[in-house]
Amino acid sequence: MGETVRTHSAAEFPVRNVSEIVRELTAVFGPSLLSFIMDVDNRSLQRWAGGYGIRYDSEKRVRDVDTVLTFLRQKEEPATIRAWFMGMNPQLDDASPAEVMRDGLSRDVMAAARAYLNAA
């Protein structure tokens, strides 16, 4: 039997500043892919990374992407995670996790991430 991936409760992680998260996400995904996922331009990402101008819905999406990234990092390297976000995914009706996250369906992306790690 395969190893089951452990899920974490929110209480196990300290609340991080959103600008720190944006900088980390930009380092992993690059500005183009992160802009696509967030449905904003690069200038918005730069403002958010500097601690300015993020709205609630955008901050929620940033934190959702970070949650999936943190989960996948249990077993995968950043380059693999980036490729996973860009690739077609059978769990998501062959859409990419980036597209599905952009559409606001973070729960579906997290379910696909669980399936991916549990199959590995």
Image (cartoon, grey):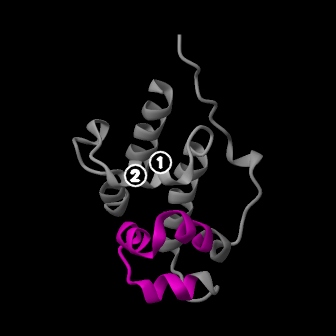
Q: Which residue corresponds to the image point at 31% horizontal and 49% vertical from the top-left? A: 87
> Does residue 73 lie above or below 32 as drawn?
above
Q: How far apart are the two marked residues, 2 and 1, measured between alpha carbons?
A: 5 Å
The answer to if 27 sits in the magenta stretch is yes
In the picture, measured across the screen, residue 29 lies left or right of residue 85, that is: right
Residue 35 rendering spot, x and y as whole percentages: 40, 74
Judged from the image, the secondary structure of the residue bearing numbered disc 2 is helix
| Label 2 neighbour load within 10 Å: few <14, some 14-19, many 20+ | few
- Which of the pair 69/52 is nearer the observer? 69
Q: Amino acid at mark 1?
A: Thr
- Which of the pair 60/94 is nearer the observer? 94
| Label 1 neighbour load within 10 Å: few <14, some 14-19, many 20+ | some
Q: Amino acid at mark 2?
A: Ala
The answer to if 105 sits in the magenta stretch is no
Q: Which residue corresponds to the image point at 62% horizontal and 35% vertical from the top-left? A: 7
In contact (CB < 8 Å): disc 2 and disc 1: yes
Which is the main secondary structure of the residues drawn in magenta? helix
Q: Which mark is residue 83?
A: 2
Q: Which mark is residue 110?
A: none
Q: Mark 1 highlights which residue?
A: 80
Residue 67 rendering spot, x and y as whole percentages: 57, 52
Q: Locate residue 22: give its quadrant.
A: bottom right
> Does residue 104 lie above or below 88 as drawn?
below
The part of the chain drawn in magenta is 22-48
Q: Which residue corresponds to the image point at 54% horizontal and 63% vertical from the top-left? A: 28
Residue 1 rendering spot, x and y as whole percentages: 53, 10
- Which of the pair 108/71 is nearer the observer? 71
Question: Residue lying farthest top?
Answer: 1
Q: Locate residue 48: give its quadrant.
A: bottom right
Judged from the image, the secondary structure of the residue bearing numbered disc 1 is helix
Residue 10 rendering spot, x and y as whole percentages: 68, 48
